[in-house]
Amino acid sequence: MSDQQLTLNQAPEIDSDLVHGAIQFLNRTLYRSGVKVAVEVSEYVIATFLGGDSSLLASKDPFKTGSLRALAEHPDLQMGAATLNRLVRIGLQVRHLPADLAEELSPSHHRALLTVKNAAHKQHLAREAVQNHWTAQQLEATIAAEKPQDEPHQGRPPQSPVVKWVNALQKTAGQEQFGETMAEAFHKLPKVHQAKVKAELKAVHAEIGAVLKLMKE
């Protein structure tokens, strides 16, 4: 099956109860880690929204139901559409790799392998990573080195990393009632998770401040 990236397209008919149940399930996975979480999310999304047919993810319109689109864009879902997309794709990838390889690789290794389209070569790289104890960074470097470097670029020129970063911040923080929505979601978290979120936000704030300072120099 192709690792075609999921895209969110307009679709009719939204089952609010289905979406609400999915939000509860997916939000509970946020504070767990590991490949098994990706497998659980992938199996849940495919069974619940795609009738168990994972082949639909290979089409140009894998989010075929309005409910699935509504889930990915819902403000109460504490993961972005890109994260949901990645978890579903990693979960499928795990199912298509031999178990002895899939279980030995970290989520970061699996994320790197998502860019490899050829199934046989994907399995070869996974085996090399396991047998040679590659870090995820080493696997990424190996994959990057295999890509042709002399192909002429087609389409628009690559966007500056700083422009991408600012656009991402604007897209998130520029949403209507962003502050109120985030505060409401924050207060629904258990106290132990609230402290973790605050610490992470402070770290991000400090990083942004450091970038702005460097830009002035």
Image: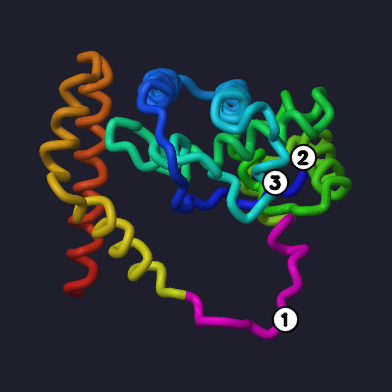
Characterize the magenta stretch by its predominant secondary structure: loop
Mark 1 — residue?
Answer: 151
User: In the shown orientation, is residue 66 left or right of residue 114?
Assistant: left
Residue 6 vs residue 209, the one in the foreground: 6
Residue 88 vs residue 151, the one in the foreground: 88
Secondary element under disc 1, as helix, strand or loop, is loop
Mark 3 — residue?
Answer: 113
Separation of residues labelled 3 and 2 (CA atoms)? 10 Å
In the depicted structure, whether residue 211 falls above or below residue 131: below
Mark 2 — residue?
Answer: 129
Q: Please tell me whether residue 152 belongs to the stretch shown in magenta.
A: yes
Disc 2 marks which amino acid? Ala
Residue 190 vs residue 85, the one in the foreground: 85
Highlighted range, magenta: 143-158
- Residue at 34% in and 61% down: 165
**In terms of sequence position, does the residue under pointer 3 or pointer 2 come before the other?**
3
Separation of residues labelled 3 and 1 (CA atoms)? 22 Å
User: In the shown orientation, is residue 176 left or right of residue 34?
Assistant: left
